[in-house]
């Protein structure tokens, strides 16, 4: 088991702050020598790079997926989908594709699969009359 003094997510979120506070960011202009940025100059540069609109869009999608999973909303949606499409694998697959398409309209195409995995995982456990939960979707979709 890997032991860490500080968890990885803490170090990743502390990195921009530490770069600004320690003053290690250097500006390399094309026409002159490299110049160390002051914390007032470094803060906008580093936070603009680390927290771009794309990164925030992805984090938002992952947060939505985590919230759906934590509060069992994903299971409720899965039950709703199964009650409408039945248990035939072809209809379940079609419903999964429509769910992914609908999710991709509102959130990033990278975060949509994370969201859809949480919605589709409960469906895959019970499609085709599986007795025990299935661990991978290919086994589930291969059954007829």
Image (tube, grey):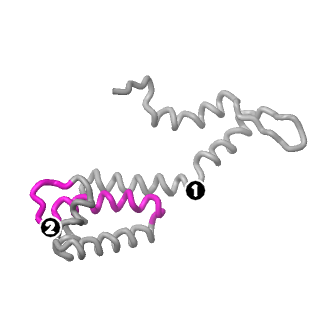
Question: Residue sitting at 34 percent across and 72 percent down?
Answer: 97
Give the residue pinned by disc 1. Answer: 53
Q: Observer-nearest residue: 103 or 91?
A: 91
Name the foreground residue: 94 vs 35. 94
Label 2 neighbourhood size at 10 Å, few (<14), some (14-19), many (20+)? Answer: some
| Residue at the right extreme, as displayed | 31
User: Local crowd at mark 1 within 10 Å, few (<14), some, or many (≥20)?
Assistant: few
Q: Position of residue 7 (x, y in %)?
A: 43, 31
Mark 1–mark 2 Cα distance, whole angstroms, equals: 42 Å
- Callout 1: SS: helix
- The reply to whether the magenta stretch includes residue 133 is yes
**Where residue 93 appears, x then y in whole percent?**
28, 71
Seen in the picture, residue 35 relative to 49 is either above or below; the reply is: above
Which quadrant of the rendered structure holds the C terminus? bottom left
Residue 73 visible in image: no
Indicate the secondary structure of the residue bearing disc 2: helix
Residue 103 in the image, given as x and y percentages of width and height: 39, 68
Residue at 45% in and 27% down: 6
Q: Quadrant of the N terminus?
A: top left
Q: Is residue 1 above or below residue 81?
A: above
Do the residues under discs 1 and 2 have CB atoms within 8 angstroms? no
Residue bounds of the magenta highlight = 107-134
Magenta span contains residue 144: no
Whether residue 9 sits left or right of residue 23 in the image: it is left
116 with respect to 90 (left or right): right
Residue 37 seen by the camera: yes
Can you tell which mark lies on residue 136? none
Query: Marks 1 and 2: which is nearer the front?
Result: 2
For residue 138, what is the image quadrant?
Answer: bottom left
Find residue 39 and report its horizontal and vertical position in percent: 70, 34
Question: For mark 2, what is the residue?
Answer: 128
């Amino acid at each position: 088991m890997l032991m860490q003094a500080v968890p990885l997510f803490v170090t990743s979120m502390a990195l921009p702050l530490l770069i600004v506070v320690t003053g290690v960011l250097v500006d390399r202009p094309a026409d002159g020598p490299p110049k160390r940025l002051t914390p007032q100059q470094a803060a906008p540069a580093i936070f603009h790079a680390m927290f771009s609109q794309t990164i925030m869009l992805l984090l938002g999608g992952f947060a939505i997926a985590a919230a759906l999973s934590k509060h069992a909303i994903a299971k409720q949606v899965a039950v709703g989908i199964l009650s409408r499409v039945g248990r035939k694998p072809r209809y379940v697959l079609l419903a999964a594709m429509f769910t992914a398409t609908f999710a991709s309209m509102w959130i990033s195409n990278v975060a949509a699969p994370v969201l859809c995995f949480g919605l589709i995982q409960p469906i895959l456990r019970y499609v085709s009359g599986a007795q025990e939960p299935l661990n991978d979707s290919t086994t589930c979709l291969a059954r007829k």
